[in-house]
Image (spheres, rainbow, N blue to C red):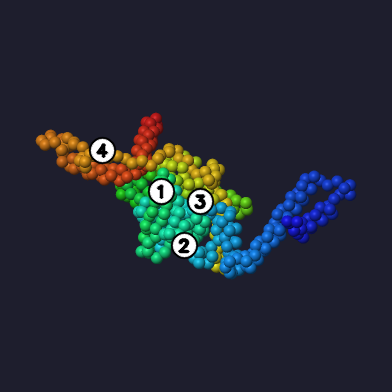
Amino acid sequence: MGQSITKGAFGIALLALLSLPVSGILNLSYAESIEKKETEVQDQSLPLEQLRNFSDIFARIKTDYVEQVSDKELLENAIRGMLSGLDPHSTYLDPEEYKELRIGTTGQFGGLGIQVGMEDGYVKVISPIDDTPAYHAGLKSGDLIIRLDNKSVKDMSLNDAVKVMRGKPGTTLELSVIREGNEEPIKFKLKRAIIKVKSVKSHLLEPGFGYVRISTFQSKTARHLKDAINQLVDDNKSPLNGLILDLRNNPGGVLNAAADVTDLFVKKGKLVYTQGRTDDSYFEFNAKSGDALNNSPMIVLINGGSASASEIVAGALQDHKRAVIMGEKSFGKGSVQTIQELRNGGAVKFTTARYFTPNGRSIQAEGIVPDILLDDMQVSSKRKNGINQLKESDLSGHISNPNGASEKSKLKEEERQKDEMAEKLQKDYKIHEALNLLKGMHILSANNKQVVNGDK
């Protein structure tokens, strides 16, 4: 009795009876198609038994619950539960929450600067956003937030938790965090600030070798990335010998932006595609431009905080063998969410498709495995007690360099620049290793070109 018999099902059954030949023998394949259509129609009909249960529970809460609850609140909670039960990324947004979401996508809002999700009833840090209170306080990808001020977040909805974390700039909030490897919770007292998200940063690591950091994927990220590469070329006064693209702790963003960023480095072929249950959920992105680096070597850095759009870029460049992927296994969010506005001014956000790399790999719950795995480490300095190692030029009465003072000053300036960059690299082992590998790739590439030219 759980399913009602619909007019559509009755009509198909009647059609099957009228279609029987005089001999009474029904073609087997036709019978199977009729049965399939009946099943599909029945699956689409309303589950009356479950709706009766819902109605009974609704009525009992209205009459027997210890406090009076409005119909609107009960129904909205039911909708929230229906969506949150699907997956961690599907949710209902009332008009106020939907307004907050749109404010957040403008790139400027008051808050702590954390991209979060849900895990086991707690709020999980996907990644801190660069140059925000959360980033400077030392919050890390994978941290579980268990308390906001004195309030437990256990079984608090993600929307409610985000609402607490956002607020007036200058106000403070204390976070209690569980971190792997720590026996006791860690407390962070953060001051809310205006969060301005700048998606692309860049600088030269050494002459010929550039570094670009993408913190999040916004609609104009690809354009800003291309401008950053052009600026690095201008600063270098010649084409780059190699580039490090840093996608660590990048929680993702706009799907089209990820495809556009990948398109800057891949000359032809598929970049990413999405696939769901409906025909219109399939969408394919293909390369349509040249290579912004002119085939120079490239390394992409990822970690456990690299999610969604970051994984699209890393996976595509890996499949096309355009870049070496270094770091740690990525987050593993390979699903696409669609936001649909409702008549009441709110919206529903729910998962409509999965995305796949050019070779057909689904990243969902798997992530991107780097070509070279690197753990977090620190590069140690050779300096002892703040004193540089003694060199020939420091000795009293050393003989002069035959190339003259100008050559000597040039060498000193290069040495000073290297020392400055070495100090920066000392704080980031992965950039240090990536740069070393990039230099090796450039040398091999240059040698191969010389061999080819020699053969000609």
- Secondary structure found at label 2: helix
Residue at horizontal 65%, vertical 65%?
60
The earlier-in-sequence mark between 3 and 1 is 3
Q: Mark 4 vs mark 1: which is more N-terminal?
A: 1
Instruction: Report the disc number at residue 119.
Output: 3
Q: Residues within 10 Å of mark 2 (few under 14, many from 20)?
A: few
On screen, residue 19 versus residue 233, left or right, reads: right
Task: Tell me the CA gap for discs 2 and 4.
Answer: 48 Å
User: Residue at position x 21%, y 42% from top?
Assistant: 386
In space, the residues marked 3 and 2 are separated at their CA atoms by 18 Å
Query: 13 or 260: which is nearer to us?
Result: 13
Marks 2 and 1, how far apart at CA: 26 Å
Horizontal side, residue 212 vs residue 314: left or right: left
Q: Nearer the viewer, residue 57 or 406?
A: 57
Residue tagged 1: 184
Q: Which residue is mark 4?
A: 382
Residue shown at the point (32%, 45%) measured from the top left:
427
Q: Which residue is mark 2?
A: 163
The number of numbered discs placed on residues in the rendered structure image is 4
Asked if disc 4 and disc 3 are in contact, CB closer than 8 Å, the reply is no
Tell me, yes or no, whether the two marked residues, 3 and 1, touch with CB atoms within 8 Å. no
Q: Nearer the viewer, residue 290 or 454?
A: 290
What's the distance in space between the residues labelled 4 and 3, CA to CA?
A: 43 Å
Q: Quadrant of the N terminus?
A: bottom right
Whichever of labels 3 and 2 marks the residue nearer the N terminus, that label is 3
| Amino acid type, label 3 | Glu
Q: Position of residue 343 (x, y in %)?
A: 58, 68
Q: Report the Cα–Cα distance between label 3 and label 1.
A: 19 Å
Residue type, numbered disc 4 = Lys
Secondary structure state at the residue bearing disc 1:
loop
Identify which amino acid the numbered label 2 is placed on. Lys
